[in-house]
Every structure is written in structure tokens, then in C-alpha cells.
Amino acid sequence: MWMKLWVKSAIITSLLTSNLGATYVLGVHSRQTSSGAISWFTCPDVNSTQCAFFDVPMDYMNPNSGSTVSIFLRKSPATAPADQRLGSILFNPGGPGGSGSATVGEIADQLRVILDGRYDIIGFDPRAVNLTGPPTACYDVEYKVAYKAYQVNM
């Protein structure tokens, strides 16, 4: 029992920490509304996965401003019978700059085997990464100018 659990943990760790990269080009798809429901569609690059865009406020301190970020999601659906499914696992790519959607697309089949097909595995692209957009600025303009001037003077 413990050996099987240890082997699964070691495999998951090695898969999730390997440097996997891919380029994904998707067509234009409708963006998700703020209703809370996610509209999944078949991903064009990995047909065994489903993709979606989910809009969230750009600024949670001012959620009614109308400015949003469209978070890109990829799901590798559970394959076990419905009565054996246990829910979803949200895959966080870490960072900076890691694409959870690309990683789930690359290792979906391996994760499905390791997890006995009992979980949906959902990866996402954090703000300003891969297919999540629009790109966001981390600093205000004045800070960027001051920071650049500081670098030039060093």
C-alpha cells in the first residue's frame, strides 16, 4: 500500500517538475460571462482535453469597473464511471511564467493513469501568461520610469 502510494507520488512529482514547453494557437472563442458557469469546448490541439476562458475582475478592489482578465483553463476530464469520480484537482503551474494549461495538455494521459481516472485535472494560465489576457502591468508607469532610470545609473 505505502509502496504504491510512494511510487505514485514520485511519478507525479517528476512529471510536474519537469520542464515541459509547447506552443498553443487557438482560434477565437467566446469569453465566459460572470455567471459563474464555465462553458467548456474541445481543445483543438489536444482533443482529449477541454478548454475554456473565464473572466475575472482586473481589480478586485473595484470589481464593477468593467475591466476584466480572461483566464484560460484546460481540463483533462475524469474517465472513471460517474459513481467513482472524486471531483477536480486544480493544477497550479508555479512560476514565474508557468503555463498550467500547457502542462496539463502535455501530461494529461500520465496523470489520468496515476489518478485512476477519478479526478478532473484543471490547469490554468496565470495573468499575463500564455493564453490568459490581456497582458497586465505589475507596476504603475511612474514606477517603471523610476526603475528604468535607476538601472541606467547603476
Image (cartoon, rainbow, N blue to C red):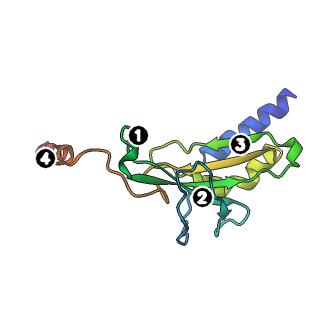
Mark 2 and mark 1: Cα distance apart in space:
21 Å
Mark 4 and mark 3: Cα distance apart in space:
47 Å
What label sits on residue 88 in the rendered view?
Answer: 3
What label sits on residue 10 in the rendered view?
Answer: none
Amino acid identity at mark 4: Ala
Percent x, y of residue 58? 39, 48
Which is nearer the eye, 140 or 96? 140
Other-residue count near label 2 (Cα within 10 Å), few / some / many at <14 / 14–19 / ≥20: many
Q: Earlier in the sequence, mark 2 or mark 4?
A: 2
Q: Secondary structure at mark 4?
A: helix
Q: Secondary structure at mark 1?
A: loop
Percent x, y of residue 38? 62, 53
Circles 4 and 3: CB atoms closer than 8 Å: no
Mark 3 and mark 2: Cα distance apart in space:
15 Å
Q: Nearer the viewer, mark 3 or mark 1?
A: 1
In the picture, the quarter occupied by the N terminus is: top right
Other-residue count near label 1 (Cα within 10 Å), few / some / many at <14 / 14–19 / ≥20: few
Residue drawn at 79 percent across, 39 percent down: 86
Which is nearer the eye, 10 or 84? 84
**Residue behind mark 1:** 60
Circles 2 and 1: CB atoms closer than 8 Å: no
Amino acid identity at mark 2: Ala
**Residue behind mark 2:** 52
Amino acid identity at mark 1: Tyr
Which is nearer the eye, 15 or 72? 72
Residue drawn at 64 percent across, 68 percent down: 45
In the picture, the quarter occupied by the C terminus is: top left
